[in-house]
Image: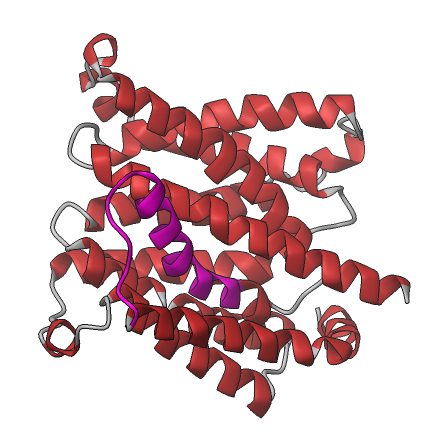
Amino acid sequence: MGNLTFVMRGHLAMLCFSALVAGSFSLGGLVANEIAPTALNAVRFVIAAVVIGVAALATTGLPRSAAQAPWRYLVLGGLFATYFVLMFEGLKTAPPVSAAAVFTLTPVMAAVAGWVLLRQVTTPWMALALAVGGAGALWVIFRADLAALRAFEIGQGEIIYFWGCAAHAIYTPMVRKLNRGEPAVVFTFGMLVAGGGLLWVYGWSDIRATDWANLRPVVWITIFYVAIFASAATFVLLQFATLHLPAAKVMAYTYLTPSWVIVWEIALGHGAPTGLVLVGVALTVVALWMLLDVGKSDTVMETKGLDDA
């Protein structure tokens, strides 16, 4: 019963994760061309690390045991930093619709990574759920416009972002493989410090070249949002979920992100979707129901994954 409770909490964590991540797409679209990706993300990681560090000290503390094998944090921080930088690099040339379509490949890649790293098995039912969710997400992303879907072309930006999504997919099972019992908040803090350090070294020239004093207020709003809500909070949610759910199920919640983006766009006054778009939203909900319906098998699959790790 206790294991099942943690499984359900993992699903709830990913529901919140998808809603918070969606906000970064809507706000990020407003400032995409106003600051270098490495500069934005270097500051983002620092702010998030401070927030998570304070949270860790106020709750679990920072045990010395968490400092064992610091290379683990470099691996995880490097993977997530790679995802964020390549996302913004890709968006320099890739239309948001095309980039979002690439993002829907993440759950499938996470399923593959979960099998390679942890031997987590994706059942036929789960594979069907991923397919239904992917179809629904694409329908939402392309606003139920078949002409837009047929016109989809792979460009340099999409290729760049694809590799970022691959890093994101590998990150998910790697959290479980490298965690040695540290609380999620402590493990997240180590990852943020390592990832931030890598970004400051790699992006130092962009950081120096940024005119920080003259950035528009919306840029700072976006930086603090992605640092606190779309980074610090979502990192904890993601790492908690990955300790209790298979990688494929964790990443399946990315299918909800386009639907949450619609909610954000409506809130920002950018208009409501058509009735046909809501068909895609319904499909993503069906996919999540399918995943929740097989929740009873999560404990068995998780035990298998831990034993094989």
Give the main secondary structure of the magenta stretch: helix
**Total marks in image:** 0
Given residues 214 and 155, the one toward you in this image is 214
Q: Picture coordinates of residue 231 (x, y %)?
A: 49, 37
Residue 73 placement (x, y as % from top left): 58, 41
Left-right relation of 16 to 99 = right
Image quadrant occupied by the C terminus: bottom right
> Residue shown at 21%/31% (left/top)?
36
- For this orientation, the residue located farthest to the top is 213
Q: How is the image coloured?
A: secondary structure
Question: Position of 14 compared to 225: left or right?
Answer: right
Residue at (76, 22) in percent of width and height: 58
Magenta span: 251-275
Viewer-closest of 252 and 70: 252
Camera sees residue 197: no
The quadrant holding residue 85 is top left
221 and 275: which is toward the camera = 275
| Quadrant in which residue 133 is drawn | bottom left
Q: Position of residue 251 (x, y in %)?
A: 51, 64
Could you tell me which residue is drawn at 72 percent across and 38 percent down? 68
Q: Nearer the viewer, residue 55 or 140?
A: 140
Magenta residue check for 57: no
Is 80 drawn above or below residue 194 in the view shown? Answer: below
Residue extending furthest toward the bottom: 124
Horizontal arrangement in the rendering, residue 98 relative to residue 175 (left or right): left
Q: Give coordinates of residue 217: x percent, y percent.
A: 27, 17
**Residue 3 seen by the camera:** yes
Q: Which quadrant: the N terminus?
A: bottom right
267 drawn magenta: yes
